[in-house]
């Protein structure tokens, strides 16, 4: 097919010829009875194999200060595990709470504490008439699900190349005290792979907002470098410089470093926030799994050990990202039917189809045996206002499966797009 010029400039006859050829190609895929799933960012077995050392029996269950980790104690995490995360993320250890296996769990609990008890002496959010959260979008569907379940109104904020649209963020936060926070995936964002610029981080820390406005800083991909190692500015320093030292709740986990659902997560915050959180945690739990903390520590060893492990992980992921990005370019480049991100790390690639074509594209893919994240999932309430954003999760399939899935996906993008263009010309 001629892709020398954008397809919107083709004549009706050219578009109809393209449609006929694409429908034949699509029918060929349907006959293959494919069953490929790219709906979530799951690690492949080859990635998990890199972590099998963590399954070995603990070499010791005694902590550095002589505590028996098989027993009760240490509400906020083992000091040596805090040190690992402190060194890795450049966060003072006194700001870190080591939790269980899930950072999402910590985010949910943090939100619920703000609803039930308030934070730093402010009115509990549940006792206010309205609570709103800013949601940079496209974004992470599980963040939005937390707000939706808890009755928090979500306000969509567009993402830019350097992070959320800060002019809009600053305006909304300054003019409305019911805006209580913002979700942020600041490095290799889900799904676009965007890295927040130092200026964006500075503005988030300094902007005018309600005294209990909180940044939920989900640095899920903080060490997931693939093509280059992007740097993230210090959000704690930005908030302290801006006069808002309690503004940030920082989350991180080893879920995509070791085993999903069997790693270690942390919550970091100002010392005053930590003291407040520990007060409630002491009622909620006796303590998290210290044996798992030790097992993770003994496998990763230290911050340099994490970095070395993630270089192995990057070697596993790069060929898959190459397949996706190279295929998108060869199949869709120059057509004007789609545009996509080229992330330097993280777990996803985001693509925008023509307006009102994402649902149609994904339905075609599903009918041909490829399941992907649903249309609208990357926006609050599953409402993509332009019905165009799609998240590609390359990690789980084998390379051969991925190549087949992406080629089919590109056929679906083109077929949905050409049908739309034909309808507009008729």
Image (tube, grey):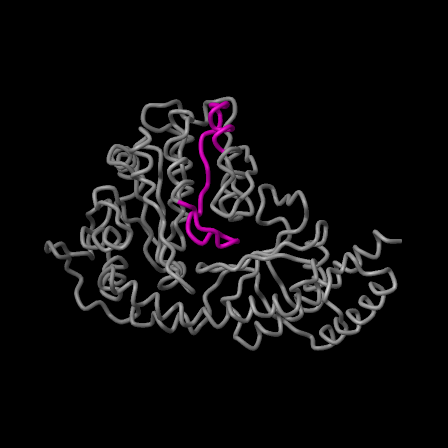
Q: Is residue 330 left or right of residue 252?
A: right
Where does the image place residue 66, in percent across and percent down from the top left?
10, 56
Question: Where in the figure is residue 395, as x and y percent of width and height?
Answer: 49, 66
Residue that extends furthest to the left in the rendered view of this protein: 66
Dividing the picture into quadrants, the one containing residue 180 is: top left
> Which of the two residues, 407 or 220, is positioned nearer the viewer here?
407
Is 187 contained in the magenta span?
A: yes
Is residue 18 shown above or below 158? below
> In this image, 58 relative to 22: left or right?
left
Magenta-drawn segment: 169-197
Give the quadrant of residue 202: top left
Q: Is residue 261 above or below residue 106?
A: below
Residue depicted at 61% across the width and 66% down the height = 329
Q: Nearer the viewer, residue 105 or 143?
A: 143
Q: Residue at position x 79%, y 55% from top?
A: 420
The N terminus, quarter of image? bottom right
Q: Position of residue 245 (x, y in %)?
A: 30, 32
- Rendered view: 302 above or below 47: above
Q: Where is residue 315 in the image (x, y as percent from the top left)?
A: 40, 72
Farthest front residue?
A: 4
Q: Indicate whether residue 126 is drawn in magenta.
A: no
Q: Which residue occupies the foreground of this view, 118 or 289?
A: 118
- Vertical arrangement, residue 262 with respect to residue 99, above or below: below
Residue at 23% of width from left, 51% of height from top? 82
């Amino acid at each position: 097919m001629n892709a020398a010029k954008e397809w919107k400039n083709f004549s009706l006859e050219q578009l109809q010829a393209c449609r006929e050829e694409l429908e034949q190609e699509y029918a060929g895929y349907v006959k293959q009875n494919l069953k490929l799933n790219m709906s979530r960012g799951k690690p492949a077995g080859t990635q998990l194999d890199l972590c099998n050392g963590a399954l070995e029996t603990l070499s010791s269950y005694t902590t550095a200060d002589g505590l028996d980790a098989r027993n009760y104690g240490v509400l906020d995490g083992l000091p040596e595990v805090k040190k690992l995360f402190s060194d890795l993320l450049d966060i003072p250890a006194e700001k870190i709470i080591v939790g269980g296996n899930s950072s999402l769990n910590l985010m949910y609990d943090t939100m619920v504490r703000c609803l039930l008890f308030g934070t730093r002496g402010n009115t509990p959010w549940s006792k206010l008439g309205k609570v709103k959260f800013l949601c940079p979008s496209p974004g992470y569907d599980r963040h939005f699900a937390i707000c939706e379940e808890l009755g928090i109104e979500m306000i969509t904020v567009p993402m830019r190349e350097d992070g959320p649209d800060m002019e809009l963020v600053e305006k909304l936060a300054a003019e409305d005290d019911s805006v209580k926070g913002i979700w942020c995936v600041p490095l290799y964002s889900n799904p676009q792979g965007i890295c927040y610029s130092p200026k964006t981080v500075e503005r988030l820390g300094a902007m005018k907002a309600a005294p209990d406005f909180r940044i939920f800083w989900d640095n899920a991909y903080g060490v997931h470098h693939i093509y280059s190692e992007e740097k993230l500015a210090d959000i704690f320093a930005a908030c302290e410089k801006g006069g808002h030292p309690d503004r940030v709740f920082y989350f991180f986990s080893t879920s995509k470093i070791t085993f999903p659902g069997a790693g270690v997560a942390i919550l970091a915050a100002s010392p005053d926030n930590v003291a407040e959180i520990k007060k409630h945690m002491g009622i909620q739990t006796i303590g998290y799994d210290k044996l798992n903390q030790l097992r993770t520590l003994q496998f990763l060893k230290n911050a340099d050990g994490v970095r070395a492990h993630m270089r192995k992980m990057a070697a596993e992921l790069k060929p898959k990202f190459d397949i996706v990005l190279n295929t998108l370019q060869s199949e869709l480049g120059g057509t004007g039917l789609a545009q996509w991100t080229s992330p330097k790390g993280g777990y996803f690639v985001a693509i925008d189809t023509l307006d009102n074509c994402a649902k149609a594209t994904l339905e075609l893919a599903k009918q041909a045996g490829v399941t992907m994240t649903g249309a609208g999932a990357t926006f609050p309430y599953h409402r993509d206002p332009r019905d165009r954003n799609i998240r590609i999760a390359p990690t789980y399939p084998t390379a051969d499966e991925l190549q087949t899935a992406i080629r089919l996906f590109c056929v679906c993008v083109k077929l949905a797009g050409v049908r739309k263009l034909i309808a507009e010309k008729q």
